[in-house]
Image (cartoon, rainbow, N blue to C red):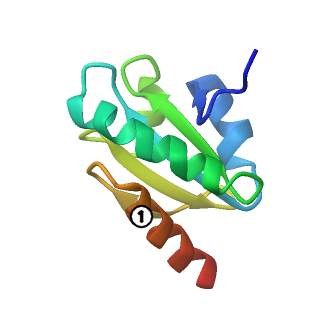
Amino acid sequence: MAEEIPKNLTDAEFEEEVSKSKGISVVDFWAPWCGPCHTMAPALESFTKANKGRISVFKLDVDENPKTAEKYGIRSVPTVIFFKDGEPLDVTARAMSESGLQTKLDSLLED
């Protein structure tokens, strides 16, 4: 089976995959009924492929995983959170383009 790009994440996996991880992780909090989430999906997939091996990128369905969404105060979808060493660094509560995602990542890597 082909690897999911980006990987779908559950509440149960979040701590191990993101909170305890080293480096940069990007999590797209989304929902199946969200039009902008579907519009952003190809950009997120391209961004994931372009940065393979540098960062980890995940999608978390807020309807199926309410604990993590509540923990991070997700009020609208899509919301993209960039984490570094398990700590949230940047929160964007809107759909992002591939170039917007890349620009944000590049600025965080410079710090």
- Looking at the image, is 82 positioned above or below residue 29? below
| Residue 37 figure quarter | top left
User: Is residue 16 found left or right of 6 in the rendered image?
Assistant: right
Residue 70 visible in the current orientation: no
**Residue at the limit of the structure toward the bottom, as seen here:** 111
Q: For this rendering, which residue is in front, 100 or 26?
A: 100
- Looking at the image, is 81 positioned above or below residue 77? below
Label 1: element kind: helix
Q: Quadrant of the N terminus?
A: top right
The residue that appears at 48% across and 34% down in the rendered structure is 68
The residue that appears at 51% across and 79% down in the rendered structure is 107
User: Crowdedness of circle 1 by 10 Å Cα count: few (<14), some, many (20+)?
Assistant: few
User: Is residue 95 found left or right of 99 in the rendered image?
Assistant: left
Q: Give x and y (percent) for residue 66.
A: 41, 25
Q: Give x and y (percent) for residue 15.
A: 67, 38
Q: Name the residue under label 1.
A: 99
Q: Give x and y (percent) for residue 93.
A: 28, 52
The residue that appears at 44% across and 60% down in the rendered structure is 101
Q: Give x and y (percent) for residue 56.
A: 67, 48
- Looking at the image, is 9 positioned above or below residue 100? above
Residue 5 visible in the current orientation: yes
Q: Quadrant of the C terminus?
A: bottom right
Q: For this rendering, which residue is in front, 107 or 11?
A: 107
Q: For this rendering, which residue is in front, 53 or 19?
A: 53
Q: What residue type is labelled 1?
A: Ser
The residue that appears at 47% across and 45% down in the rendered structure is 44
User: Is residue 108 found left or right of 4 in the rendered image?
Assistant: left
